[in-house]
Image (cartoon, rainbow, N blue to C red):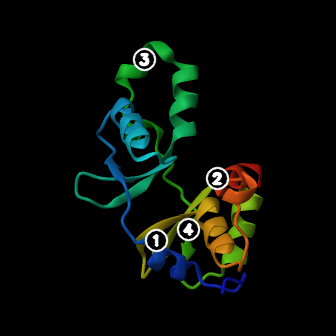
Amino acid sequence: MFDGDTPVGDIIRDKGDSMITVEESQSISTAAQVLTHHRIGLLVVMSTERKFVGLLSERDIVRAVAKSPEKISEILVGDLVTRNVTACDMRATVDDVLDTMRENGFRHIPVVDGGKIKGIISRTDVLRRRWTDLPGDDLAEDGISVDEIASII
């Protein structure tokens, strides 16, 4: 049963710890294609040595295109990556992580263990977990998707 004291590590273990990554040397066009292909809104950015560099969101790409559309082919992932990233520990509670997301306007937050990134948790992940654990509550039956609710909060 879900409750706000559930460690986010439980959600990472349930959804799997695979992360979609790009290298900072790749073009933002490639990053946009990866985001579209996987139907996600955030990429983990790695160095060529496979070390964590930061995060790149679809919003980062849209802002760059809006700011300098004529230079889009020259922009690399490393030019847009958010390097100073707020993360949470695997033992952090869902309520604490949601508070951090709300206070900072985040939709996603990396989850770390022993200084290594273990996965990304999103508001949608938390809502999916919350709604799946509610007995007899079928959002699809009501015509409401978890993704729609996540976009509101």
Q: Are marks 1 and 3 in contact (CB under 8 Å)?
A: no
Give the percent coordinates (x, y) of residue 9.
52, 80
- Which numbered disc covers residue 71? 3
Mark 3 or mark 2, which is nearer to you?
Answer: 2
Q: Which residue is mark 4?
A: 87
Q: Earlier in the sequence, mark 2 or mark 1?
A: 1
Q: Nearer the viewer, residue 146 or 44?
A: 146
Q: Earlier in the sequence, mark 1 or mark 3?
A: 1
Q: Which residue is mark 1?
A: 15
Give the percent coordinates (x, y) of residue 36.
43, 38
Under mark 3, the amino acid is Lys
Give the percent coordinates (x, y) of residue 22.
33, 48
Q: Which residue is mark 2?
A: 147
Q: Earlier in the sequence, mark 4 or mark 1?
A: 1
- Residue 15 left/right relative to 1: left
The part of the image, by quadrant, that contains residue 135 is bottom right
Q: Earlier in the sequence, mark 3 or mark 2?
A: 3
Label 1: how many Cα within 10 Å (few below 14, some 14–19, many 20+): some
How far, Cα to Cα, is label 2 from label 4? 22 Å
How far, Cα to Cα, is label 4 from label 1? 18 Å
Instruction: Please tell me whether mark 4 sits on a helix, a strand or a loop.
Output: loop
How far, Cα to Cα, is label 2 from label 1? 16 Å
Q: Residue at x 66, y 77 (%)?
A: 94
Q: Residue at x 33, y 34 (%)?
A: 30
Q: Are marks 2 and 4 in contact (CB under 8 Å)?
A: no
Instruction: Please tell me whether mark 3 sits on a helix, a strand or a loop.
Output: helix
